[in-house]
């Protein structure tokens, strides 16, 4: 049976969380299921995983700089948004949640989010205190009210040494949710 991801365009935003390294495995699993993965790497995300890694696994160029659009092979944020079947941000930081909730567009990812008309899935990963902060809670509520879907975060040991909620949802679960989102009738 063909995967619901076969031939689908997944735009994958990778932001500045220690969990960014898991974006490589997510990219690999999505590709194995037939998805065309278009990575977007924020400045913070690039501190944890390289564009070369994502580009090699995705077999697509990595969009990173809004200001160098149109210089060579890098697709424009509007063109990429128009072609996307789903926008996934994994990991998604509190900063990016706030940008999305408040319509801020300082970089490629947040600019693409504002023009995207496809389903959006955010997989938060951050310190538990950040996740539970009233500002983050309000931003999640705002985005949920606009139809944005969330997966996670899960509980466990966090990179900061605390135990609690804030870990990126397991990659297999993120893939399953994307499949469900792209399966007609589900």
Image: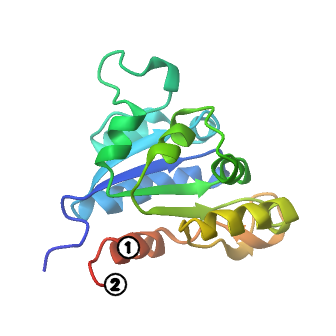
- The mark nearer the N terminus, 1 or 2, is 1
Q: Nearer the viewer, residue 92 or 99?
A: 99
- In the image, what residue occupies the spot 45% across and 34% down? 51
- The quarter of the rendered structure image containing the C terminus is bottom left
131 displayed left or right of 5: right
Q: How far across and how far down the image is residue 109, in percent?
A: 52, 41
Residue 180: quarter of image: bottom left
- In the image, what residue occupies the spot 50% across and 64% down? 121
Residue 142: quarter of image: bottom right
Secondary structure at numbered mark 1: helix
Q: Which residue is mark 2?
A: 186
155 displayed left or right of 58: right
- In the image, what residue occupies the spot 44% across and 50% down? 12
Please say if the residues under marks 1 and 2 sit with CB atoms less than 8 Å apart. yes
Residue 74: quarter of image: top left
Q: Residue furthest bottom?
A: 186
Distance in Å between CA atoms under marks 1 and 2: 7 Å
Q: Which residue is mark 1?
A: 181
154 displayed left or right of 116: right
- In the image, what residue occupies the spot 66% across and 40% down? 104
Relative height, residue 146 to residue 101 (above, below): below
| Residue 127's disc number | none
Relative height, residue 20 to residue 165 (above, below): above
Q: How far across and how far down the image is residue 103, in percent?
A: 64, 45
- The quarter of the rendered structure image containing the N terminus is bottom left
169 displayed left or right of 38: right
Few, some or many C-alpha atoms within 10 Å of disc 1 (few <14, some 14-19, many ≥20)?
some
Secondary structure at numbered mark 2: loop
Q: How far across and how far down the image is residue 24, in percent?
A: 44, 51
Q: How far across and how far down the image is residue 53, in percent?
A: 42, 39
């Amino acid at each position: 049976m063909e995967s619901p991801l076969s031939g689908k365009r997944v735009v994958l935003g990778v932001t500045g969380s220690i969990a960014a390294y898991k974006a490589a495995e997510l990219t690999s699993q999505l590709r194995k299921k037939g998805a065309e993965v278009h990575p977007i790497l924020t400045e913070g995300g690039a501190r944890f995983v390289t564009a070369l890694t994502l580009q090699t696994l995705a077999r697509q160029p990595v969009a990173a700089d809004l200001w160098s659009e149109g210089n060579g092979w890098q697709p424009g944020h509007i063109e990429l948004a128009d072609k996307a079947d789903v926008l996934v941000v994994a990991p998604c930081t509190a900063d990016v949640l706030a940008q999305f909730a408040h319509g801020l567009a300082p970089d490629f990812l947040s600019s693409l989010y504002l023009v995207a008309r496809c389903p959006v899935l955010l997989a938060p990963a951050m310190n538990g205190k950040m996740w539970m902060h009233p500002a983050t809670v309000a931003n999640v509520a705002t985005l949920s009210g606009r139809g944005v879907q969330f997966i996670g975060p899960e509980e466990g040991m966090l990179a900061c040494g605390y135990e609690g909620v804030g870990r990126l949802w397991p990659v297999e679960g993120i893939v399953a949710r994307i499949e469900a989102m792209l399966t007609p009738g589900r």
